[in-house]
Image (tube, rainbow, N blue to C red):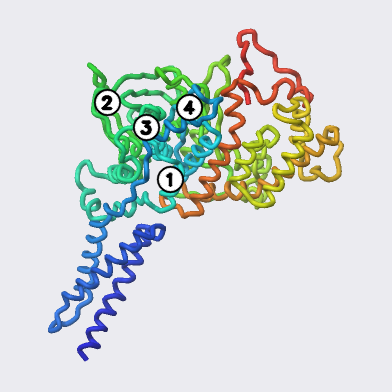
Amino acid sequence: MALREFVLQRLVLAALLLPCLVAWCGFVQDHRNALYLLVDLLAVVLSLVIAARLIKPEERFRPLKVVPLALLIAWLAVSALQPALQTKVHVDTRRFERMLQSSNPAARGKAFGLSLSGGGYRAAVYHAGVLRGIEDVGYMPTHLVTVSGGSIIGSFYAMGGDPTDFRDAVAKGVFNLRRELALAQNLLRLPMPNVSRLTVQADILRRTLLHTAQPTASAPKHMVAMTDLNFGMQLGLVDRKFLILDPHNDEYWRIGEAGSVLPDRATLAAISGALPGAFPVYSVRLSTSGEELRQLQLADGGIADNTGNLLLEAARVHLEGWALDVHLASNAGAVPGYGKEVRGLEALWRSISILERAPAFPRQHKCEPRRYLPVSPALLCVIDKRDLFDMRTGSFSERERSGPLNVGWFIPLLHTDQELRGIVGVVASARRLEALERFLLTRQRALGSFPWDSKRLLHVSAAVQQTTPDNGCGARRERLPILDPDSEALRCATVELQNAVRPEVQRLCDRFITTPTLDDQLDDDQVDDIFRLGRLQALMASMRHTAIVTKRPLIDPNEWRRIQGLPDVPRSQDCPHENEGMG
C-alpha cells in the first residue's frame, strides 16, 4: 500500500508539472532550440526529484503546496544554466585581410558602400544573404551604414563574422529575447533603474555576436544609425565620430567627434533597433571637445530613414574617408501591395516602411556619375500595378497574392557564364541546370565570346522585353521584331531560362512576405529561404556592380532607345560624363 501511494504521488506530481513545462516552452518558444528544450526538461526532472524528497510519509500529500516549489526550483535551475548555454558565434578578426587578397581585380582600390535597412531578424537574414552574394563575386564592402535589424548583422560582419554563421545562429534560435526576459536574473532586475528590455537585448548580442573587442584595420568602416526623438534627426555613429542629419532637409547637418563616453557596439546595435513601444528610449547627452550638446532621446534608426541611404550619402559628402565608387542599398523593408492582414506592432512597422519609401533614394547632383544600386525584395517580388487598382471584387486575386515575379531584374543575356552559374546554383534543380546549359551554348553561337556583339545583344534584349506568355517560343507574333535564326534561338533560350528560374524565386519571395517582421524565432526553412533570396538578388545585381565600378555601361542608353523607336537623350554640355557607369 505504501509503495502504491508513493508511485501515485509521483505520477500526480509529474502530471501537474508536464503542462507547466509545455506552457513554458510555448511561451519562450524553445521548440526551435534542441539544447534549450533538453535543459528545460532536465530542470523539471530535477525539480520533481527534489520536490518528491520533500514529501514526508507521515504528512498528507498536498499537490498545491509541492508544485509551486518544484516550479520555482526548475525556474532557478534554468536561469542558472542559461549563461553556459549561450552560443558564441565565431568571429575571425583576420577575415577581411584574406578577402582583400582574393577580391575581384575590378574592385581593388574601390570604395564600396553598403546600406543595410531595418526590418527585424527577417531583414538581418536577408542582408546576410546579400553579403554572401557580394563576396561570391569577389567584392568586399569598405563602408557600412546600418539601421535596426541591419545593425545586428552589420555589427557582426564588421567585426569579422561570416554571414553564413549568422544565418545558422538565427536558425538555431540563439537570439531569444522572450526567454531571456523570463529568466530570474533578468525578470527580477527589470523594475530596477537602468535595466530594461533594451539592456537585455544588448546582453544577448554581446554574449553571442559582439564578443570581440575591436575590429581590425582592414574591416569596413561601420556607422550605426539611430533616431533622436527630441528633434526628429537621424544620428550616425562611427568610431567616435558622429553625423547628425535632418532626413527631410539635406542642408541641415552637423559632424563632430564625441567627447563623452559612448555605449558599446552591442548597445548601439540594440538602440538602432529599439522600436518605441517594444523597447524604451535611450537617453544620452552627446558632448564634443569643449561643447556639450542637448540631451538626445535615441530610438530605432528606421523612424527617420529605414534604409540608411540618406545617412550613407551624407557621410559620403561630409565625412573624410567616406568617398564612394559604388553605393549598394540592401532594403529588406515591407513589400507593399499584398493582401496580408497586419495588426499591432506589425501594422506600425508597415506604416514606417511605407512612409520611408519616398525619401529612401540618395540625393545626388545631376552631373554626378551614377553610383547607386538598389537590391530589395520590393523590386523583385512585385504585383502588376494595373491589377492593383481593379477593386471590383473587393479582394486580391490569387495571382496577386502569389506575387508575379519581376523578371526584369534577371537578365541572363547580360551576365557572364560564371555569374549565371552562381545565380542558378542558388535555385538549383535538374531542369534549371539543363536550361542554363542550353542558354550558354545558344549565346555562344549567337554572340560569340565575351565581349559580345553589342548590336545583336541589344536586338535580342528588346525582343525578350516584348515577349509574353502568348508569344513565347511557339508561333511568332507580328509585334515581335524580326531576328535572324541564331538570335531567335537565343531569345527562346533566354525566355526558357527565365521561366525555369521563376517558380523557385517566386517561392522565395512568398516566404519573405509571409515571415513576420518582428519575430526573432524563425524556423530553418524561413531562414534558409530568406538568406537565399538575399544572396540571389546580390548575384543578379553583380553585372551592375561591375558596370559602375569600371565605368563601362552594359549597354549604350541611346542605342537601346533607337531600337525601341525612341529619340536619343540629349547630352548636357555641363555634364560631359552624364551616362558614365550606367548599368
Q: Nearer the viewer, mark 3 or mark 1?
A: 1
Question: Label 2 to label 4, Cα distance in Å?
Answer: 26 Å
Please tell me which residue lies in front, 217 or 83: 217
Q: Which residue is mark 2?
A: 286
Q: Secondary structure at mark 2?
A: strand
Q: Residue at x 46, y 19 (%)?
A: 323
Question: Label 2 to label 1, Cα distance in Å?
Answer: 35 Å
Please tell me which residue lies in front, 122 or 339: 122
Q: Residue furthest bottom?
A: 1
Q: Which residue is mark 3?
A: 226
The disc at residue 165 is 1
Q: Quadrant of residue 482?
A: top right
Nearer-N-terminus badge (2/1): 1
The crowd level at tag 2 (other Cα within 10 Å; few <14, some 14-19, many 20+) is some
Q: On screen, 480 above or below 473?
A: above
Nearer-N-terminus badge (3/1): 1
The crowd level at tag 3 (other Cα within 10 Å; few <14, some 14-19, many 20+) is many
Q: Which residue is mark 4?
A: 113
Q: On screen, 474 above or below 329?
A: below
Question: Label 1 to label 4, Cα distance in Å?
Answer: 22 Å
Q: Residue at x 25, y 27 (%)?
A: 285
Q: Secondary structure at mark 1?
A: helix
